[in-house]
Amino acid sequence: MKMSKYLQQGKSENYQDAEDKKLLKAGEVAALLTKKFKMKITALELSPFATEWHHGGVFKSATGQSLKGKRVFFFKPADVEKVSLEQILRNREKAAAPKPLPDNSIVQGWYVQFFKMTDPVSRRVYSKPFVGIYKGPKSKAPKGFHVLGDEAFTVAEKQRGRELKPGEECKF
């Protein structure tokens, strides 16, 4: 029976089990807390306090180009009383706080770059490390990036693409 409901309504079995357990959805809890605190509270603000979440179906995205899954958050009735207005307001402030801008200062240096190689005899694919050079914004630097001064960077540029032995650390 649940599978046919899933096909009709787009609700997962876990979602249907949560409804059978009489768990409250985030929208219902938001309505209760709005009345209790006399302040507008949305279901999205309550998601960090939810007991569990389940898929509520698949819908078209805002652009209409792809499909998106919808999460529905559920609360146990006893857990609703534990959510305080202070917690909700603290989460609002955290969400409204401006995010720091990425550091776009120009850096230069080297990093270990891996290329996939194929052994011609066994046809086994393995990764081989090489010296990679990067010069650009600090926020877009690759993993394992090491900053170098101007003199060391000119030496490193001459060694670009050099194979590294296992565990070898470059000194420029």
Image: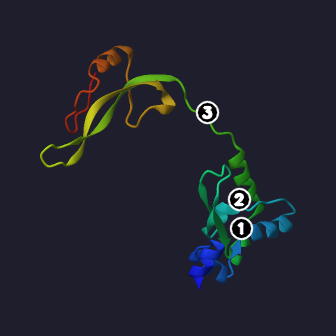
Label 3: state its secondary structure.
Answer: loop
Mark found first going from the N terminus, 2 or 1:
1
Residue 81 appears left or right of 69: right
Residue 73 at what x, y percent from top left? 65, 67
Label 2: state its secondary structure.
Answer: helix
Question: Looking at the figure, which quarter contains the C terminus?
Answer: top left
Which residue is label 3 attached to? 101
Residue 115 at what x, y percent from top left? 29, 38
Residue at left offset 64%, top offset 39%: 99
**Mark in the foreground, 3 or 2:** 2
Residue at left offset 72%, top offset 58%: 45
Question: Looking at the figure, which quarter contains the N terminus?
Answer: bottom right
Using the image, tell me which numbered label, if any, was put on residue 60. Answer: none
Residue 51 appears left or right of 163: right
Q: How many marks?
A: 3
Q: Residues within 10 Å of mark 2 (few under 14, many from 20)?
A: few
Return the residue nearer the eye: 88 or 120: 120
Quarter-of-image position of residue 46: bottom right
Q: Residues within 10 Å of mark 1 (few under 14, many from 20)?
A: many
Residue 78 at what x, y percent from top left? 70, 77
- Indicate the amino acid at tag 3: Leu
**Mark in the foreground, 3 or 1:** 1
Label 1: state its secondary structure.
Answer: helix
Mark found first going from the N terminus, 3 or 2:
2
**CA separation, marks 3 and 2?**
25 Å
2 to 159, vertically: above or below: below
Residue 21 seen anywhere in this rendered image of the structure: no
31 to 1, vertically: above or below: above
Residue at left offset 38%, top offset 18%: 149
**CA separation, marks 2 and 1?**
8 Å
Which residue is label 1 attached to? 26
